[in-house]
């Protein structure tokens, strides 16, 4: 029997995608993973410790880091607290398309005087 910690590489990525597709209301497409709407800023060691965990696990770890006095940039903290997502669309367990759009809209509002055009989702 294969143990969970023995799953690596492509096999891990395939399994991860299947799990996220099943658990997330709208999934997280490969195209949206490496966009600014899915970006959080953390110290390298803290970011590595979070790894490829699902949002809920990362959120809890961010809160623990914050409570222990670790520096968490303000907007990263707000993203993990779902500050940018309207309450009626909020669900704490996943970083959804609604969350990505709301976060990107907030980034565009803050940077509007510095950008020639708004940042698009993809």
Image (cartoon, rainbow, N blue to C red):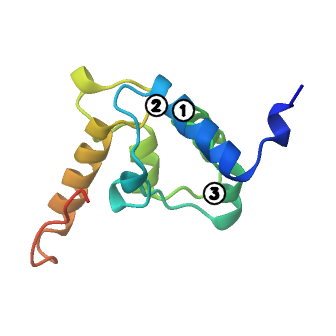
Residues 11 and 60: in front is 11
Mark 3 lies on residue:
47
Is disc 2 placed on a helix, strand or loop? helix
Mark 1 lies on residue:
18
- Corner quadrant of residue 107: bottom left
| Label 1 vs label 3, nearer the camera | 1
Which circle marks residue 107 in the picture? none
| Label 2 vs label 3, nearer the camera | 2
Q: Alpha-carbon distance for marks 2 and 3?
A: 23 Å
Task: Compare marks 1 and 3 and give the one earlier in the sequence.
Answer: 1
Residues 25 and 9: in front is 9
Contact, mark 2 vs mark 1 (Cβ under 8 Å): yes
User: Which residue is at a point 62% across and 46% down the rendered structure image?
Assistant: 13
Residue 8 drawn above or below residue 39 = above
User: Which residue is at a point 15% across and 59% down the rendered structure image?
Assistant: 109
Answer left or right for 32 relative to 70.
left
Task: Compare marks 2 and 3 and give the one earlier in the sequence.
Answer: 2
Residue 58 appears in view: no
Q: Quadrant of the N terminus?
A: top right
Answer left or right for 23 relative to 61.
left
Mark 2 lies on residue:
21
Is disc 1 placed on a helix, strand or loop? helix
Residue 43 drawn above or below residue 58 = below
Residues 10 and 28: in front is 10
Q: Alpha-carbon distance for marks 2 and 1?
A: 5 Å
Q: For mark 1, does the 10 Å Cα neighbourhood hold few (<14), some (14 to 19), or many (20 or more) residues?
A: few
Residue 74 appears in view: yes
Q: Alpha-carbon distance for marks 1 and 3?
A: 23 Å
């Amino acid at each position: 029997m294969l143990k969970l910690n023995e799953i690596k590489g492509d096999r891990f990525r395939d399994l991860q995608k299947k799990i996220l597709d099943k658990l997330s209301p709208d999934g997280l497409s490969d195209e949206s993973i490496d966009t600014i709407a899915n970006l959080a800023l953390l110290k390298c060691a803290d970011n590595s410790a979070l790894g490829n965990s699902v949002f809920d696990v990362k959120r809890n770890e961010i809160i623990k880091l914050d409570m222990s006095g670790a520096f968490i940039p303000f907007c990263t903290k707000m993203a993990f607290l779902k500050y940018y997502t309207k309450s009626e669309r909020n669900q704490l367990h996943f970083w959804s398309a609604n969350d990505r759009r709301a976060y990107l809209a907030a980034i565009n509002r803050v940077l509007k005087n510095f950008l020639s055009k708004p940042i698009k989702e993809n």
